[in-house]
Image (spheres, coloured by chain):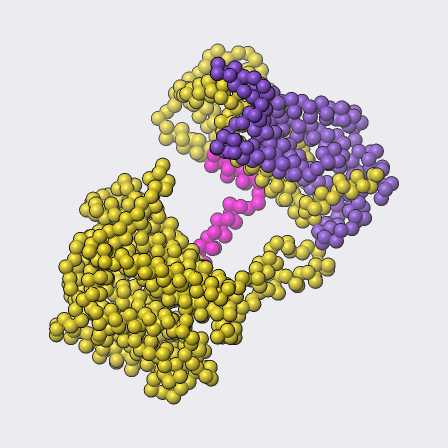
Amino acid sequence: MNSLILSTAARILLPILVLFAIYVLWRGHNEPGGGFIGGLVAATALALLEKAQGLVAAQRVLKVEPLAIAATGLGCAIAAGIWGALAKGYVLAGVWPLLSVGPDGSKEGLPVGSILLFDTGVFLVVVGGVSAMLFALEAAALEVIDQPPDTAGTESDGTDSTGTDSAGTGPAASDHGRPEGDGANQEAG
Amino acid sequence: MTDATDVPVSIRPLAPMAGEGVDAASAVRHVPPPSWMGRPISKLIEREPRLVPALAYLPAAVAGLAFLWFCTMIGAVARGDVLVWRRPWIEEIGVETSFLVDGLGLMFALLVTGIGALIFTYAAGYFDGDPRRARILTLLSLFAIAMLGLVLADDVVTLFLFWEGTTITSFLLVGFDYQKAYARRAALQALLVTGLGGLALLGGLVILGEAMGSYRLSEWNAAGQAVKESGVYGWVLALVLLGAFTKSAQFPFHFWLPGAMAAPTPVSAYLHSATMVKAGVYLLMRLMPSLGGTEAWFWILTAVGAVTMLIGSIWALRQSDLKQMLAHTTVMGLGTLVMFLGGGTEKAVLGASLFLLVHALYKASLFLMVGCLDKKAGTREVDQLAGLGRAMPITAAAAALAALSMAGAPPFVGFLGKEVMYEGAFAVVTEPALVTAAAYVANAMMVAVALIVAVGPFHFRAQASPKATPVDPPWTLLAGPVALAGLGLLLGLFAPLTGELFTVPVAAAILGRPVDYHLYLWHGINPAFVLSLATFALGYLFWRGATAFRNGLSRAEERGLGSADLGYDKALVLVESTARRVTGSLQNGSLPFYMRITFTAFAAVIWGAVALSDGGRLVATPDIPLVNYATLLVIVVGAVVVILTRSRLTAICALGAIGTGISIVFVLYGAIDVAMTQLMIEILVVVFLAIAVLRLPRTPQRMGFRVGDAGVSAMLGLGTTVVLISVLATPLDMQLTEYFQEKSAPVAFGRNIVNVILVDFRALDTLGEIAVIAIAAVGAVAALTAGRGGLAAQRRHPVVERSDER
C-alpha cells in the first residue's frame, strides 16, 4: 500500500493516537476508558502505521519485540498483585501510597498506586499481544508471496550470517516498506 | 561389593539417539529437530545423581523407626482402642485429613513399614554401584508414604488421593527400566487397568458420600445398614468392586500383575506381593461393614475370588521363571483373600485376616530370595538352577523356611493360616463344598510351588547355574528374606499371641464388632487337620507332575489358548482405532466444517435450553426510538452484503459495518466502555482479516447460497434472539450492581464501575484474562513463524535494518 497520503497521515496520527490511548488509560478509573480500551487504541494506532508504512517501519518505531511488551505488562500486573499482598496482606489489594482519606471520606493527594500499575499492565499486554499477532501474521503473509522456502532453512541452522538476512529481507521490504527507508536499505546492502 | 557388572540391566541406554548425532549432521540437514526435544533427556540419564553410601540406608532407617512407632500401638489396638487423628483441610466442601488406626489399619501399617524397612535395605544393596539407586529409593519411599496414607485414611478423599498415589508410583516403578519396551508396556498396562479402576472407585465413593452426607469411612461403617438399604447401593457396590478388583488383580483383570514383574525384584517383592496389590483387598475389608453382608457381595466375591485363585495357581505351574511363578501365586493368594471375604462368616474373615499376614511374610521373602538367586547365580529360570544349597547355604535356608510356611507345614504360621482357612471354608454362607474344594486345590498347588522354589534350585542334584561361582549375597540382601522367613516361624510358634495381637483385632475391624477367637498351634485331629494332610499329598503329586503339566499348558498356549492379556491388547487397539476414526471425521481440517459443527452445537444447546425451560415470557417492548431502527438498518444491510457479495474485501468491510452498528447499540444503551471496546475490536478484526483472507488463494468453489448453512445461521440467530428476549423479560437482580455503585467510589476511588470491577474488585479474573491474551499471542506468533527460523530470525530483522541505515 504505497499511498503517500496515508503514509504521511499515519506519521502525524501516530503520536496523537498513542497520547489518546494513554489518556484513555489514565481517565479510565472515573470516566469511560481503562487499560483494555487504551491498549486497543494503541494497538489500532500501530496497525494503522503498519498498514501505511509497512512491517519494517512499524517494527522500527516500536523498537522492542511486541511479545516483550506483553510480558512486561503481565509482569506489571503481577507486581501490582504482589504489592497489594505486601502492603495489605492479600494479593491484588488496592494500594494508594499518595492518597490520604479523611475521617469524613474526603480524599487528598494523588490516586496513583497499585491499581494504576495493574491497569498499565493490562494496557501493555493488549498492545503487545495484539501487535505481536499482527506483525507475525503480516510477516507470514509476506512470506507466502516473497520468500523462497530455502532461505528459511539456512536461517534456522543458527549460523549467524547477517549478510544472508539482509539479502533475505531486502526484497520483502522493497515491496511493502516505506520508499525512503527501502532505498537506504538497498544502498547499504 | 561394588561390581557394576552384576547389575542386571544396562545403565547407559539411548544416549546417542538424539544428542551427538544431530550436532554433527545439523550443518547438512535443512530442519534440525528442536534442541529441547531429546538432548536434555539423554543428558539427564547420564547425569543421574549418585548417593552418599550411608544415605542409601536412610529410607530403611526411617521406615524402621516408623515400624517401631507402630509397634508401640499394638497393645492398645489389641485391647480394642481406635486411635484417631483429624484436621480440617478444605472445610468449604467438607474434606478433612483424617487418619484412624484400628486393627486392620495397624496390620497394614506394620506390613508397609516393617517389610518396607527390609526392602529398602535390600534395594540399597541390590542397586549398589548402580547410578539409578537414588531414583529407586526415592520412588519406593514415595510409594511407602502413599500406601501408609491409604491404609490409615479415614476420610474418603484422603483415601482416594493416596490410592491414586500408589497407582502412579507403581507405574513409575514398573516402568523403571523405561528403555525396555516390555517394561514400558507393562507399566502402561498396570496404569491403565488400575487407573480405570481408580476412576470407577472415585465414582462409587462420591455417590455413596453424597448419599450418606458424610465422607468418613468410620461413619459409613457405623451406618452400614442404611448404606445397604439406600437406593444407590447397587451402583456403589459395582463401582467399588471394580476399583478393588483391578487393584488387586482379580479375574478378569488379573493379567496386569504378572506383567508388572518387569519391575526390579525389590519392587516386585514390595508392591506386587506384600502391599500395593493388597490395597484392593484392604478396601474390601475396610468397607465390609458398609457394603458386605448382601447376597450380591457374597456371590460376586466368592465367584471372582475362586476363579482368580484357580487361574493363578494353574498358571503358576506353567511358568519356568521363578519370579513369574511367584507372581501367579500372588494372584492366587489375592483370589483366596477375596473369596474368604465373600464367605461372610466370622470364621471366613478370620481365615482371610490370618492369611493376609502369612502371605505377605512368605511371599516377600521368596521374592527377595529369587532376587538373590538372580544376582548371584545369574538366572531365574528354574531349569537352569540346581544343587546350589552348598554354595548358597543362607539363601537356601531362607527359601526353605519361607517355602515351609507357604506350604503350610507346622509349626509355621502358614500352617495356622491353612487350618483357619479350612475352618472358614466349611462355614461360608454360599457353597461350603465348592469353596472348600477350590481352597483345597489351590493349597495343593501352593505346596507344589513351594517345593519347586525351595527344593529344585538348591537340593538333590549336581550344582548348575549360569554363573560359575555362585555365592551367598552380602548381608543387605540376606537380611530381608531371612528376617521375614524367620518371622513366619516365630509367629507360628507363638500362635496364641499371634492370634491375640494380629488376627483377632484385624477380624474385629473388618467385621465391625468384637471377635472372640483363640488361635492355637494344635487344634486336635479335626476335619481341617485331615484336609491339611491331604493337601500335602496332593501337592506332592502336583510337584511330581509339574514338568508334564507345564509342557501340556505351553502346548495348549501354542494352539492359541485365549488369555486376558490378549483381550487387553485387542481392547487397546479398538480404543485407538475408534479414536482415530472419531478424530479423523471431526478434525478433518476444513474450516467451514468446524464452523458448521460449532454453530450447530451452539444452536442445539440454545434450543435445548428453550425447550427445557418453562417457557420464558416473550414481552414486546413497544417504545423503541427511531434511531434504533436506523442502527438496525445498518446492521441488516451489512449482513445482507456479507452474504451476497462476491468480493472478499467487500465482505470484510461489511462485517466491520455490522460490528460498528452493534457498538452504536451499546452507545445508545449507555454502555460506553463496551462500545469503545467493540469499535476498536472491529477495526482490528478488519485489519487482521484483510491480511489473512486477502492472501488466501482463490477457491474455485461458487460463493452461492447454501441451504444448510443458512438453516444453521437462522437457527442460531433466532435462538439467541428468543433467549435474549426471555432474559430481558426476567426481572434483573440488581443486588450486585447496587453494591458496586455504592462501594466503587469510596472503597476503590473510582467512579467508572466497569473499570473498577475489572482492575480492582475482580482483578484476579483480569489477571487471568491478560495471561490468556499473552499466552494466545505467544501461541499465535509461534504458529505463524513455525518453520521460518523462529523468533530469533524475526527479531533480527529490525536490528539489521537499523544497523544498515547508520
Residue A145 lies in the magenta-colored region: no
Answer left or right for B720 relative to B90.
right
Q: Nearer the viewer, residue B167 or B524?
A: B524
Q: Is residue B21 left or right of residue B168?
A: right
Chain B takes which shade in the image?
Answer: yellow
Percent position of residue A164, x then y: 79, 49
In the rendered structure, the answer to whether residue B61 lies left or right of residue B648 reads left
The residue sitting at 72% across, 40% down in the picture is A142
Q: Quadrant of the C terminus of chain B?
A: top right
Q: Main secondary structure of the magenta part?
A: helix
Q: Between residues B291 and B275, which one lies in front from this camera angle?
A: B275
Residue pushed farthest bottom?
B462
Q: Position of residue B692 (x, y in %)?
A: 66, 37
**Residue that appears at 48% across and 33% down:** A90
Q: Which residues are magenta?
A: B573-602
Residue B301, image quadrant? bottom left
Location of residue A117 in the rendering, given as x and y in whole percent from the top left corner: 59, 29
